[in-house]
Image (cartoon, helix red, strand yellow):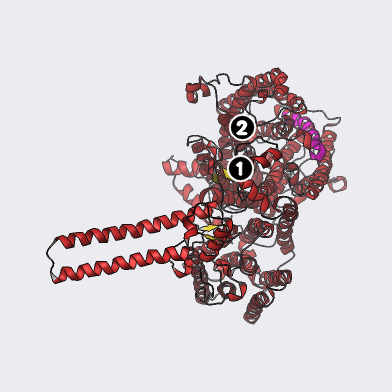
Amino acid sequence: MAAIPHAHDDAHAHAHEHGREMSLGKFLTTYVFSFDHKVIGLQFLFSTLIWFSVGGLLALGVRWQLAWPWTKMPIVGDLFFSSTGGQISPEFYTMLFTMHASIMIFFVIIPILAGAFGNFLIPLMIGAEDMAFPVLNMMSYWFMWPAFLCMIASFFVEGGASAAGWTGYPPLSSVHSAAPASHTGQTLWVMGLIFVGVSSMMGSVNYMTTIIQMRAPGMTMFRMPMTIWGMFITAILQAFALPVLTAALFMQLMDRTIGTSYFIPEGLIVNGAPAGSGGGQPLLWQHLFWFYSHPAVYIMILPAMGMVSDMISTFARKPLFGYKPMIYSIAGIAGLGFIVWGHHMFMSGMSPWLGTTFMVSTIMIALPSAIKVFNWLATIWAARIQYTTAMLFALSFVSLFIIGGLSGIFMAATPVDIFIHDTYFIVAHIHYVLFGGSAMGIFGGIYFWFPKMFGRMMNEFWGKVHFFLTFIFFNGTFYPMHILGAAGFPRRLADPYHYETFQHLLPMNQFITVCAIGMGASQIILAANMIYSLLKGPKCGRNPWHANSLEWTAPSPPGHGNFDFQPVVYRGPYEYASPLVDDDYFPQTRPPVEGEDKLAHH
Amino acid sequence: MTDPHGHGQIKLQYQPALPIPNGKLFLWLFLSTEIMFFAALIGVYIVIRFGAPDWPGPSKMHLVELIGAANTLVLILSSVTVVLALDAAQKDNASLARLWIAATFLLGGLFLGIKVFEYKSKFSHGIYPALPHSRMYEKPDVYFASAVRERLRVLYARIDADRAEIASKKTNLLAGPQTEDVQRQIKDLDDRDKVLADKKAEYEQAVGPVAGDANASAHALMELSKRIYPVHDEHEKNAEGEAEHESIGLNDKYPELKLPFVVTGGNMWATTYFTMTGFHALHVLAGLVAFVLLLFKRLDRTRAGIVENVGLYWHFVDLVWIFLFPLLYLF
Amino acid sequence: MTEPHDTHGAGEHAHAGHGTTKQYLAVCAALMILTFVSFFTFRLLHNTQVQMTWAVMMAVSCVKALLVMLFFMHLKWEASWKYVLTIPATIMAIFLMIALIPDIKWRFETIAGGRTPSEERKVHMGYEHEPGTPAETEQGGGH
């Protein structure tokens, strides 16, 4: 019996006693320091969307430099580089791509999936009134703020924000004098990530407890929607992988502040002075970092896979094909995800025995991933698909994930990886999986659950415009990167055209940048659609999509405590087009009908 | 559809999968993350420890195994007291439970006290986790030699400054009337000046000319490093401390010298030792805070769950130490 | 979230079963004896058979950890959920440590190979030299 649940009840009773007039205290407890999982989820959603735009703008900076190298960069050039006529410095370029990746991974994709959708959906979908530990939940959001502040501050310190790559490989990241941005900027980066880690850790333990202990009567583990399964397995991944990164980050922080030398090799001389005091091992950082960051790849995609499964089944109006295999393959991906991190390190000089082991285990991940893809395809097979915006995004998730997954198999093989290592092929792969996969899933999730979040529908026409523009510009941006990569075009160089070999690739880069600007501009439609619908969108009922899972039985938006009745679950969440009922959907809470036990196939 | 709070909220029923309270489940899951955290630390230690070409033994780093063993016993005892506190709380014996929690708190405090004592003995020998406080060098190289020169320069400059001050005082006194009191003062100053001069000569002789020689050979530097901080043999160590070492280095003989010294692998030893014991000590500290909070509560049967959870955490802290002790003190 | 089952759960759990004071003290005595076992193994054998002492001490530590978990953490009397919550973490922790080990050997065989290479590196690092031409750097260090 933890003290936290009591505190929560007391606080809420307190909040409710104080009348209906909007005092400052009530405003703060309702919207700012709220214990309510829905408010916390929306706080995560809006914070991460703001970071999404920041990360996107940084990416456009990277693209500008690659398309029109050393020309005057719009806005940035005037603001920071007036002395060089708007021409950015190579250090600034490294900072741009480092911060783009760090922000997109640690401040957008992970918190929007686990923090925003996880928080909002878990209690609603399993029939709980809130998380198991609401105060802890609130703290997990507010621990993001020191991280936000560290990241913002790092742009304004001397030397600029971190420029050691989002992987923060030492000694570049560990030695102060290694680069201008290795000063305070890198320290703030490390501290920011530690805060994110603490936040995610609190969130993950909370999610696991909630999902294990607080399901509505009848909601067995194998009646949970795939979204919940994705969140659950993600939480497990986070719980086991994140502490390792936290430990590594602490070590790097100590290397940087008190001068230990965990990751600084013996005898390293930087700028004419010894960098560290002892004989540390830079490779160790890579092991620890990827021990987290490879599972993190699945942390970034599994919840999206779950959400997409729900959307596809709902709009195909068919049961999800192979519900249990889907769960087992998620679990398989997660389990294998822990033993494949070395495929990021084929070129790092680690023991070659490990290389082969990691190659085999990595290629094995293709199996559960393929099971998932085939099950999605089987679900939409011969279905009367409702092409809503959410469904379009879900379908694009599946197709782009196939491309991203296939290019992943190439680089899983050591011999191929030696060739394409650190080229744009890798950049293409990660964006197909992370943007084409996770971000498309997130967009779909926003269109799908927006009615539940705010009680209003989003505009479908502009949603589709947003979808088609995003989809086309996305492929225009990232597909050519495969070709660039095969040509050997290196990533993380401010001016690859310095080498004659790559000069002929300039026009393709310009095309990519134009598409990237188009893709960035398309997101304005999403923002406008969200803001307009939030205020003026048509009101919707409890179940606008005629979906089965529990959250659609709650009011839109759900009030405090979520449910105005005791939800009792009688079946799985994917009973669409059931012959037993007249409707083409069969909600989890509807009492059993005659003959159902004979037909039960889940 | 009952409405116990009177504002549209109903009490929902759940179907828990595990027959334990949420708090306990939370704690076990939290401990899983903690296990991974310490697994990373220990894994890093193993890689650095066994990947290092040379690693200093405990006695070389002024680490006393018996103190570590004593600390282990303290933690084990505190684990017993906390489990007895839980026993008492479950039997609804609140005052006894509080007594045991207080005992646990004191034992945890004792553990930290011993830890502070150990840290202090390292610091006093110039062993810090890292530069700039650390005076430890990996090998007798040019950096070591220049650090020794710099340290001696500072030391001698201070002595010279003191002597100059004495000389100026003496001049002032000589200029004035030569009373008996003044005569005594002058003699006093002369004595002090002689002490300082002797001291400097002693240092110079002890350290030897090699310290001032920018072109000293590697062999000479090696000899110097051995004079400053002799390689203590395993057999010489004893429970009482360092004073009984047979081969006494300059840093032991003249503690005020504080010369840089050479311990191969010593910096990585310090890095791992301070990190691991430091993170463990932080966990002990968190446990102590929890015990203080418990002391303000009536620990009857209804609070047994809280006592149990804090106890589980405390046993975990004990578990970590059970592995840290041999790894850090006895390997 | 103080739903009824929660408070009941705690109450029931309290009576689910636990050791007696005598048992706890016996475990405590065993732990202390084991601590001295590892201590004296170190004293007696460390100078002659290092690997042996490492093995003994780790085995002793594992036994101690098991005792603490079984009796003090009450796992001996818990239902089968204990396996779900303890074994995965243990496996992952051991796996992480084992996975780091191949690099130690590799490091010895290639990079470390004694202390000389890093010594040379130190001399060379101060010089400006063309990247990727170790032979030239070698000469550069000789000046």
- Queried whether the magenta region covers residue A480, the answer comes back as no
The label number, if any, that marks residue A65 in the structure image: none
- In the rendered image, residue B311, in percent from the top left (x then y), is placed at 59, 67
- In the rendered image, residue A85, in percent from the top left (x then y), is placed at 51, 19
The residue segment tinted magenta is A393-416
Q: Nearer the viewer, residue B29 or A496?
A: A496
Q: Nearer the viewer, residue A432 or A190?
A: A190
- Queried whether the magenta region covers residue A400, the answer comes back as yes
Q: Nearer the viewer, residue A361 or B162?
A: B162
Q: Do the CB atoms of the residues marked 1 and 2 lie less than 8 Å apart?
A: no
- In the rendered image, residue C70, in percent from the top left (x then y), is placed at 69, 71
- In the rendered image, residue B106, in percent from the top left (x then y), is placed at 49, 72
Which picture quadrant has residue C42?
bottom right
| Left or right relative to A342: residue A558 | left
User: What residue is pinned by disc 2?
Assistant: A97
Q: Secondary structure at mark 1?
A: helix
- Up the image or down, B208 lies above or below A335; here it is below
- Up the image or down, A136 lies above or below B60; here it is above
Q: Residue furthest right?
A: A598
Q: Nearer the viewer, mark 1 or mark 2?
A: 1
Q: Secondary structure at mark 2?
A: helix
User: What residue is pinned by disc 1?
Assistant: C125
Q: Nearer the viewer, residue B171 or A395?
A: B171
* Residue type marked 2: Phe
Tell me the subunit letter for badge 1. C
Residue at coordinates 64% horizontally, 46% vertically from top-left?
Answer: C121
